[in-house]
Amino acid sequence: MTKSPFVAVFLSLLMLSGCFGSGDSSDTADENEIIPVPYSIEASWNEESIMGEIGEITELTILLVTTGEGSYEIESFITKDGEGIDANGWSVTQKPTYISVVLLPDSPGEYQLEVTITPSEGDSIVMTNSVDVAVPDEGGISLIVPQYLVAESSVMVFQGQVLHQSIESCNVVLTIPGEGTSMDTYTMSLQDDGAFSFILSELDLRTESFLVHAKASCGVFSSSEDERNTSILIEVNNDADGDGIEDQFDNCPNGLGEADGWASSSTSDADQDGCRDYDEDLDDDNDSILDAEDGCTSTIGWISTTENDRDRDGCNDLTEDSDDDGDGIPDVNDACLDGEINWPANLYNDWDQDGCNDLLEDADDDNDGENDTSDLCPKGRSNWMSERSELTDFDMDGCFDSTEDVDDDNDNVNDVNATGATLDLCPTTPLGATDVDEFGCAAIERDSDSDGVNDLIDQCEGTPAGLQVNAAGCADLDGDGVFANVDICADSPTHWTIDSDGCAIVQKPVQWTTGTSVTGPMDIVPTFTVPTLDGTFTFQNKWTGTDVYLFMFKYTDSSGNSNSGTWATNPGTFIRNLPENTHLFYGSFDSTYHNDVLSRKSDVESRLNPSEEEQWDGRIHYIDMDASNIQGGLGDMISNFNSPFFMGIDRFQRARDTGSIYAWISQTNDPFHYTYEPHQWNAEFEPEIRMQDSGVDVVTLYDFERHAGGWGANHNSYRNATFTLPENLSSYDTLEVFHEHACDERRNRYQKSDGSYGGCHEWDYLAHLYICDDDNSSSCGTEFMRWITTYGREGRWLTDISPYLFMLEDDQERRFRYKGANKGDMTIKFLFSNWGSGERTFDAEFGFTGGQFDGSYNNESRYVRSLNFTVPSETTRVEIVATITGHGFQKDDANCAEFCDHQHHYYIDSHHAYEWHPIVYSNTGCENEVSNGVVANQYGSWPFGRAGWCAGQDVKQWSHDITSWVDMNGQINELTYRGLYNGQEYNPTGESSKGGRNIVAEIWVVFYTNSTV
């Protein structure tokens, strides 16, 4: 274990103007005092879990990153196989930016390193690592002893030698027969070259020959063994050929000998086998390799084996053979010493001459560092591994770029063509790069949209020119302040608060609400589960918060009367008119429900084309059960709705009934009208969710409060509102009014069993909201809002009346008068917001009202039709703002003023503008406005277009900018107003009476100024 301190000093250079010196004031130093940075340290290994070798230094480094001023201490341990190791075998050195751990392994095993860094501040850091040291290859062993010795005297010297690369690890034991059956063992003392000797004595006392058994074992870390027997000859046998070698050891007992004047000697019979080396002995050194194949005269007693003579050339690999495997490549250059043997290492089968057979052994035939499996030039330039780098082989494919590689960067675009002309404009394309174009340039090298971000990291390719982008190459395409790579809501609307995901609340899903039961329309619908032809549908599991749901049920009464004609209307036309976020359900209350929905499914599939089927996949459901047995939220709706055959659920998870499908043009019921219901639910979503926008401040006037209605004293009701807002009113540029007109029981108009009516009111009447004077709350004649009530249904609308901001002041409590004949539970809320226009209205001049459109509308003796005004000095813009609707019909041939297109013209000098009402020319003009707030399927003539209004809709203001018309310098401007028909004074024909053709008009000249922030 070692333990030592180290101080890491964080240096900061403070660059100040002027000079540093003894004259610098202490005040200046105080002002520039450095705030200490907390001390911290981060540590990481440069390598982990590496391999080491015995006797080779292994170094590991802990990289340090420090901040602030402080110090640290370390404790270090190294163990092998759980035991501590000698301190001389390792060391730890500390430097400012790293800690070095050096290990010199002396034995194989797994070495575990642990370094604990304890900083002066914070927790200790424990760094662990490991080094695995494998058992080394210690080579083979050879034991050399004589084959036999002849005891010619009582004493004899027995000599031998053991061959091994680590002689000091060797042990040689001789086993010699003793008296009787005993065996005596003797451990030899080895010389540096492995030679040993032993004196055999008292041989004259032995009467029989015997064997000396020699056994050698060597190895520092792994043991290898060899053993040999030597015959000691005591009794002299016959020597038939008189060559001096007894017949029992004479391999040529009847060969050359005394008669031929030859006797065996070490020069003529090296292995003393009784065969003359020159002409009788085929293996002179008796190493088991015939002389014809023996490349060495080996030490007598050594025998060639595959372990000590791999190529069986008769040369001891350890001491004699410089080419152990006989491939022609010297061992010092041979990379496959243990490989194939006795094969010719020529260029054909060993291209790089490394001694490895290319076909069988060599994984890198040309020795360039690239395995043949991935080397595109395996027989190319050889032995250039030391030269090989990205400069010579850019794509590291084993081909030398300048002479072999036709595509240096391996991007499938050749560097040049046959004439040498450049083809690859990006010759060093990063390896593995994707999306390489025909010019050899990858995404990382291109910037297709010229936004300064390469295509590889550009998450928004195709950014329009001129837009500012972020590091991901993405612009704010929809102007919501959120870049496209994190903007999950494309095309965010203006005048809505955008969150960090780029979404307005109107674009986000509505969260699931846990309900209990449904007692009628507008209740939250709890979950329900129904079987369908395509599987089980569970409402909560399928809830997305962005969808609406329309249910259509077939029903046959006891008399056989059925709504099957409506239920089975052409599904192709029907489905095509549904909004895309609709789930459509077909079901049946009849006992034939299964066949009913099968028929519906077949009809739907036959009417939709393949692309439409794909679009509506998973959105059309066929309920495969008797609808009267449905449970849960849908079952509650069926039980508690007046007409449970056609109904729905809106985006707020509320139960919705459907209205009348009577088509006023054909004067028949048209099932197609049911498709308007989901459009209405979608249209109502924005007005209601608007109040949840975090950028909108709400002042409540009516909060589901009763207006009694009628034509008497209850025709008007009054409420006060205090306009205390988070910001000054002058900072808001937008004023909207949300209005819900709810009916009794939240139901459509219906006839009760006693003949009376429940639910909603019957007629489409004018409804007004007036603001009372701030100095006289009993004077309430200034119109603030106008609506047209529905025929027999509820409605909810959001209306922008920003031009009327001038009517309100900070912290005022203002009185309002609601006027209308239809009763109901009213919700009216004022929504204030600022969307950065930089202007708001601050003043206005009331211009004109309407009157009877009977030929006298422009008679200035009856009505004011000219306005003189001056523009206030702080004005930035001037507008005409008009709210105009025409009422009454069947009083003249033109059907004025409700169904005729009266135009409203404004003049200042040569300037002219007008408002007109082309919707009156369409019998379905209002039917086509369901997506703009018209309540669908009302119980009256709601589809017809009217002059300036629709039944069941708010009345919108019309405005026109006349800033360029007027004098802004205090001079009087004269505005003239005329109500015309077909561009001319209206002269009615076919009059039935003078009255009943009323135009309700509120016309202002409003002045804008800069809003405050």
Image: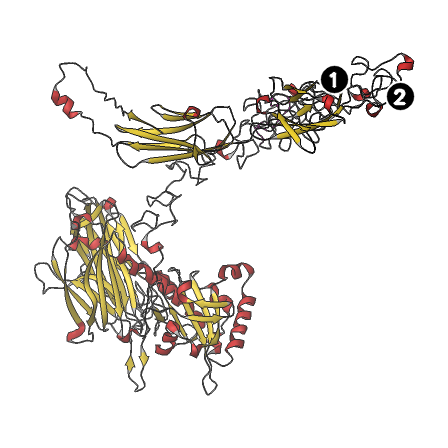
Dominant secondary structure of the residues highlighted in magenta in the image: loop
Q: Secondary structure at mark 2?
A: loop
Q: How many marks?
A: 2
Q: CA distance from mark 2 to mark 1?
A: 23 Å
- Work out whether residue 844 or residue 320 is closer to the camera in this orientation and state it: 320
289 sits left or right of 896 in the view: right
Query: Is residue 854 in view?
Result: no
Q: Which residue is mark 2?
A: 240
Q: Secondary structure at mark 1?
A: loop
Depth check, mark 2 against mark 1: the one in front is: 1
Identified by mark 1, the residue type is Ser
- Work out whether residue 645 or residue 350 is closer to the camera in this orientation and state it: 350
Seen at 80% across and 14% down, the residue is 265
Percent position of residue 900, x then y: 33, 65
Asked if the residue under mark 1 is in contact with the one under mark 2, i.e. CB atoms within 8 Å, the reply is no
Q: Which residue is mark 1?
A: 153
Percent position of residue 953, x then y: 30, 65
Percent position of residue 306, x then y: 71, 28
Give the residues in magenta.
Answer: 395-410
Identified by mark 2, the residue type is Ala
